[in-house]
Amino acid sequence: MKARFEGRVAIVTGAAKGMGLATAVEMARGGAVVVLADIDAQALQAVAVELQRVGSVTTVACDIQDRKQVDALVQGTRKGLGRVDILVNNAGLLLPGTIEETTDDIIGRTLATNVKGILYAIREVCGGANNGGHDRKPDQRRVVSAGQRVAASTPGRHGGTPTG
Ligand SMILES: NC(=O)c1ccc[n+]([C@@H]2O[C@H](COP(=O)([O-])OP(=O)(O)OC[C@H]3O[C@@H](n4cnc5c(N)ncnc54)[C@H](O)[C@@H]3O)[C@@H](O)[C@H]2O)c1
């Protein structure tokens, strides 16, 4: 029987741990060639050897807040693996603390990661700002974004039901 992701090329962001790592492992087990991207290069390195036993994987250090790094991740994948079929936009910040403790810096990093970073990745996978080289027809692309908890669901606190 053909494996679920056989022949697919997938990028998973925030893949050094947690749900991103679990998703990347499942996709690799299902036959995909998986590019694991994360801001934490050390954590990526720590899982890389183990991952080789699971399937076809490669790791790339990438901060999705930085458009140039995101573009390089997607373009490097295309160059090395031929195309990008699946993007799992998993990298994100879940910030603890009350709304009173939420500084401008925290708001800035949250928006840069959970909003801008995700849009940079989707745009580049869908052809880039200059609309260069689509890999698949629009209805064949697969983009998954993990729910981001940006809004406060309980008075004074972040968290609760994922909003997106
Ligand atoms: N765990 C939950 O209950 C929950 C609930 C709702 C939404 N989410 C969202 O799901 C996703 C995964 O959750 P998790 O619990 O596995 O998270 P996690 O904190 O365990 O892992 C997140 C990973 O993303 C990486 N990362 C953070 N900022 C990054 C950046 N700028 N560029 C690249 N990588 C970056 C981190 O280094 C880490 O490896 C996150 O986006 C989170 O916001 C999680």
Image (spheres, rainbow, N blue to C red):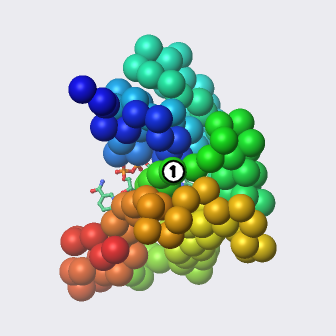
Q: Quadrant of residue 97?
A: bottom left
Q: Which residue is painted at 31% across and 81% down in the image?
A: 152
Nearest the camera: 156 or 160?
160
Left or right of 84 on screen, residue 145: left
Q: Residue 5: percent from the left, percent from the top? A: 37, 38
Q: Is mark 1 within 8 Å of ligand 1?
A: no
> Where 36 sits versus 71, above or below?
above
Nearest the camera: 7 or 97?
7
> Where 126 sits versus 32, above or below?
below
Q: Quadrant of residue 107?
A: bottom right
Q: Residues within 10 Å of mark 1 (few under 14, many from 20)?
A: many
Count all numbered tags in the image, as a single digit.
1
Q: Which residue is painted at 34% across and 74% down in the image?
A: 164
* Amino acid of disc 1: Asp
> Where 94 sits versus 164, above or below?
above
Q: Give the quadrant of the N terminus.
A: top left
Q: Which residue is painted at 22% across and 71% down in the image?
A: 160
Residue picked out by circle 1: 85
Residue 11 visible: yes
Q: Residue 23: percent from the left, percent from the top? A: 36, 41
> Where 57 sits versus 49, above or below?
below
Instruction: Report helix, strand or loop for mark 1.
Output: loop
Nearest the camera: 151 or 56?
56
Q: Which residue is painted at 68% across and 57% down in the image?
A: 70
Residue 98 visible: no
Left or right of 52 on screen, residue 3: left
